[in-house]
Structure formats: structure tokens, C-alpha cells
Image (cartoon, rainbow, N blue to C red):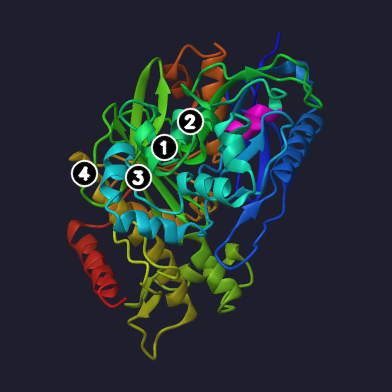
Amino acid sequence: MPELLMAIDQGTTSTRTVILDRTLTVKSHGSAEFPQIFPRPGWVEHDPEAIWRSTLHSIQEALERGGVSGQQIAAIGITNQRETTVLWSRRTGAPIFNAIVWQCRRTAERCNRLRAEGYNELFRERTGLVVDAYFSGTKIEWLLDQVEGARIQAENGEIAFGTIDTYLLWRLTGGAAHATEVSNASRTLLMDLAGGGWDPELCGILRVPPEILPEIKASTAVFGHTRSVPGLPDGIPITGMAGDQQSALFGQVCFDIGEAKCTFGTGAFLLMNIGNRPLPSRNKLLTTAAWRLDGEMTYAFEGSAFIAGAAVQWLKDGLGLITSSAEIEALARSVPDSGGVVFVPALVGLGAPHWNPDARGLLWGITRGTTKGHVARATLEGIAFQNSDILGAMQQDLEEPLKSLKVDGGASNNDLLMQFQSDLLGVPLIRPKITETTALGAAMLAGIGCGMYAGIHEVRGAWQEAKRFTPGLSVEQRKEHLLRWQAGLRRV
């Protein structure tokens, strides 16, 4: 009997495959990088075939490393970089162009025109998003307009669109399944957030033919079955899908209203479960679909800080204060505090809830006594301050206090940063035993979808805590830190 779950985590620079058993213990993993393509400044592309090759390589490596047979896999889950856009021929399966990556800004002018024409509020009300080149809708329009013959082919039903989940599903099923699920669909600017279906009016504004769109399914649906995948037998069900940040929210078992997670990567991605109503944000946060289970939608507030781990990388590569990112914690601990230094990590502008693209990074409060230890500590504190602003906005919008914060991602292993984040928020921070929560969420969804688990109550029991950080500052001390941060923000 098949007893293992496979999670494919398709990211921006690499694809990772993780194999877990029923207790959600990692048995094996494999990974493969693929090239980034930068045709001009601000433009980012991927070769979809390279993504597919990296997926096959990671699957094979995971199977071989763990001594696992494909026959042992009960179900597959997929999680993915969310807004990246692919169009391909339904007949041949060949992409008509490179994938346009979520980071790509080539449609920024088109978005400016849409906002000038007054469409931003309509898209915000209908989708929970803002009109921005980040999302898939204007990327689809660009591809249909720029690739010769693509628009006519699309209107004739000869072309398929997908975010990366949909593209991988198509390849894993040998072209038999063209589907997505709600969390990915909600990142396209084309899905009605309340209803969970494609919105004809929004498709019309962005000139996206409905013929190219995949079917939107629940997050634990049977999306299809494997066919002609090297290393895997035909017939393995693909029963879980979610965008990477929603998958991490699920993997952190944030199933109740007000539960939140922060993924500390190059940037920081924060999501908070807001229940079964797509609440609008008064604080410029995004409202997004989290998942759909048993016919009911769950929604989340989302806010992102553009710079988190990238600030540490800047200290290493730009200033040469450290030779590896792992050294930052020891350097920051070499001083008892930041010595009054404030670092605002607006190296590429400020994201939610400030949304100031013209802001630039700031080191403020430097004196003759300032050392590189103070700069290192202020850098870690700046990461935490940004997150505190986002979570404060989420609590205001939800009108519910934060009870705790689940953390994951590379920088979540920095105990000093985690303790300061807990101090600032005044709530416990909880780091799980498995910090690969994106893959974990996909595996949990797949396990529910294939019947291995009865529901979320069962996967909640399998989640394990590794370390808890409890706040150690008084209310007055916390206020002093925040006043110092706000003084820095006023100067950017």
C-alpha cells in the first residue's frame, strides 16, 4: 500500500521535492536550480522547459536519496511561485514564450494607465489586490499582444494559460488536466474573491479570453493523475495545490482566525487567517484566498516587506562587515543593544503598510561610538520593526489581537532576531520542527485530498513545535523602541 506523500515546491530559483511519511516526518528530499533570464533591466523570465527539467531532477533525486520507489507515493502536492505566468500550446504542450516571472515589471506602464483610468478600486473590491505588474493579469495580456498570432490562437481555444501550479499539473498528467486552485487563481487579478470564479468583467478589461483559463478547484481536489513521468508510475493522484505563501500558512497550521505566520526569506511574507469572509483592508494590505476545503473558502490578509534576509546579504556583499550570513547573529550579540542606531531597510522602497516606492535605506543615530556590532544589531532590529508594522495593520483591520506568530524561512533560525521580534510584538514566536513549511503545507493538503487524513484536525496533531520565544520587554520599553523606529521612518 502506498504510504508516503510527495510535495513539489517550485520556487523562483529552484525546485525542491520533499517526501514525507504519514507522521509528516521528512524521509527524503531533492532539489535542482534553473537559470534566471534578464532580457533588460526590470524584466525577469524563466524557461518553462527548464522549470520542468528541474522538477524531474528533484523528483528523481528525492526518490534515489531516500531509497523510495514511486509505487510508495500515495499522493502528490504542488506549491509554487504564485504570479509567474505561462502560455502554451494545447496541441503540442510547448510554451509560446518564456514564463513572465512575478518580479517582472514590464507591464508597469500598462498598470499605470489602468489606475489613471480609475480601475484600481474595481480590481481591489473584486479581487482583494491592487493593479500592479506583480500579478498575472497584465502579464497574460502582454504575451497575447507581443507573441505573433497568440491572441487569435487564444480566442480559438488553442492556447492554455497557467501559473506554475497549472503548468506542472499539465506536464505531470501528460496534458490531461488543465486546472488551478483558489489561492493561485486569486493572484491573477481575474478571480472574483467572494465567489471564487473567473470574473468576466475583469477578463474583459485585461483582454484575456476565457478560453485560455484553467478550471478553479478546491485546494484538496483530485486535480489529475500522473502519466509518463520518469520515476513515477502512472495513476498517482495529485490531490493538493496552493501558492507558496498560502501553503506555508497551512503548513504552520494557522487554521483559526487571527493566527499568522511570517516567512523570513530574501523578504518577509506575512499572512494572517481572517476566516470565511474576504474582509477589505483599511491599511493597504492585500486580501487573498488562503484555501478552499469542504466547499468553504478561507481568506487571509497578506503583507510583504521587500527586504529581510537581503539586508544581511547587503552587510556581507555590499559593506563587507561579515563573510557569511551566519555570522550576523554573533556580531549583533557582541553589543548589548544597537547603541541608538536605527536601520530602515528601504533598500528598494517600503512595502506594506507604508507603500513608499521612493523611500531609500537609512542608518540613523550613528556616533563616534558606533561599531559594526551596533550596525549588525540595528539591521536585525530593522527587519523586525517592518514586520511589526505589518502585523499591527493586520490586527487593526481584523479588530482582533495577535496571540502568537509562527515563523519559518532561513532567518527564522536567528535566535536574536526571533527574540527581538517577540519582544516588539508582545506575543510568543513559535518555530516549528520542520521549517520547510511550504512543502509541508502541500503535503498536508495532498494527504487530506487523498484521504490519508480525515481533515485539518488530524494534520494539526502532527505539527510539532521546536522552540518558543516569549516577550521580555515591558510595555514602556516596547514603546521606546517603536518611537525610535518611527523617528527613523520619518527621515527616509
The answer to whether 353 is drawn above or below residue 279 in the figure is below
Q: Are marks 3 and 2 in contact (CB under 8 Å)?
A: no
Q: Identify residue type, mark 4.
A: Asp
Binning the other alpha carbons within 10 Å of mark 3 as few (below 14), some (14 to 19) or many (20 upward) gives many
Q: Are marks 3 and 1 in contact (CB under 8 Å)?
A: no
Please identify the quarter of the rendering in which residue 351 is found.
bottom left
Secondary structure beneath label 1: helix
Q: 390 or 221: which is nearer to us?
A: 221
Residue drawn 35% across and 45% down?
A: 129
- Which numbered mark, 3 or 2, is in the foreground of this view? 2
Q: Identify residue type, mark 2.
A: Pro
Q: 27 or 210: which is nearer to us?
A: 210
Residue annotated with mark 4: 397
Residue extent of the magenta highlight: 164-171
Relative image position of residue 432 (x, y in whole percent): 49, 38
Residue annotated with mark 2: 210
Q: Identify residue type, mark 3.
A: Leu
Residue annotated with mark 3: 129
- Which numbered mark, 4 or 3, is in the foreground of this view? 3
Mark 3–mark 1 Cα distance, whole angstroms, equals: 15 Å
Left or right: 482 as drawn, with respect to 470: left
Which comes sooner in the sequence, label 3 or label 2? 3
Residue annotated with mark 1: 203
Please identify the quarter of the rendering in which residue 400 is found.
top left
Magenta stretch encompasses residue 11: no
Q: Are marks 4 and 3 in contact (CB under 8 Å)?
A: no
Mark 1–mark 2 Cα distance, whole angstroms, equals: 7 Å
Mark 1–mark 4 Cα distance, whole angstroms, equals: 29 Å
Secondary structure beneath label 3: loop
